[in-house]
Amino acid sequence: MAKTNKTDFYQEVTNKIIDALEQGVKPWQCPWREDVVAGLPLNFSTHNEYRGMNIMLLWMSTQLNGYGSAQWLTFKQAVANGGKVRKGEKGTRIFFYKMVEKEQDGKKRNTQC
């Protein structure tokens, strides 16, 4: 699979936001309607809540696709948990970031990457 650069992914996110707005979906607003799952998106395997821009991306995907759960898995997590991904299904891309410790001026500092 060819990797896209970060600039392309940022443009892809921008395009998704514009598409959602054109369909009447406010992607930054939690879907509190009863027919749509509400709450923060959660990783099914790790039980960690998603943070930052990923919340909006996953809410938007939930609303646009009519998903019935706020829990998410990677393909590998689904297989490891005995699940299967239906042929033709597409994933929702999100940002990966973590805190790393870098040394600067002889002092260690936490930085996001």
Image (cartoon, grey):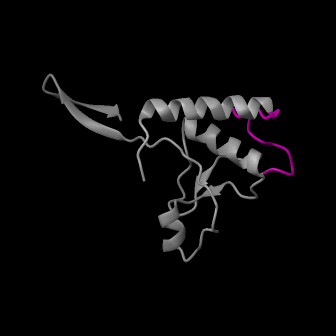
Q: Is residue 95 left or right of residue 64?
A: left
Vertically, is 67 above or below 84?
A: above
Instruction: Please tell me which residue is depicted at 50% across the width and 60% down the height of the picture.
Output: 46
Vertically, is 41 above or below 73?
A: above
Q: Is residue 41 left or right of residue 33?
A: left
Q: Quadrant of residue 25?
A: top right
Determine if the magenta segment contains residue 74: no
- Outermost residue, bottom side: 82
Q: Is residue 18 left or right of residue 23?
A: left
Q: Residue 17: x and y, percent?
A: 67, 31
Instruction: Please tell me which residue is depicted at 53% across the width and 53% down the height of the picture.
Output: 48
- Outermost residue, front side: 2
Q: Is residue 40 left or right of residue 32?
A: left
- Outermost residue, top side: 105
Residue 38 in view of the camera: no
Q: Quadrant of the C terminus?
A: top left
Query: Magenta residues: mostly which secondary structure?
Result: loop
Determine if the magenta segment contains residue 29: yes
- In the image, the segment drawn in magenta is 23-36
Vertically, is 94 above or below 112?
A: below
| Total labels drawn | 0
Instruction: Please tell me which residue is depicted at 68% across the width and 46% down the height of the picture.
Output: 61
- Outermost residue, left side: 106
Which of the two residues, 106 or 10, is positioned nearer the viewer here?
A: 10
Q: Residue 11: x and y, percent?
A: 55, 29
Q: Residue 109: x and y, percent?
A: 26, 30
Instruction: Please tell me which residue is depicted at 65% across the width and 35% down the height of the picture.
Output: 16
Q: Quadrant of residue 71?
A: bottom right
Vertically, is 26 above or below 88?
A: above
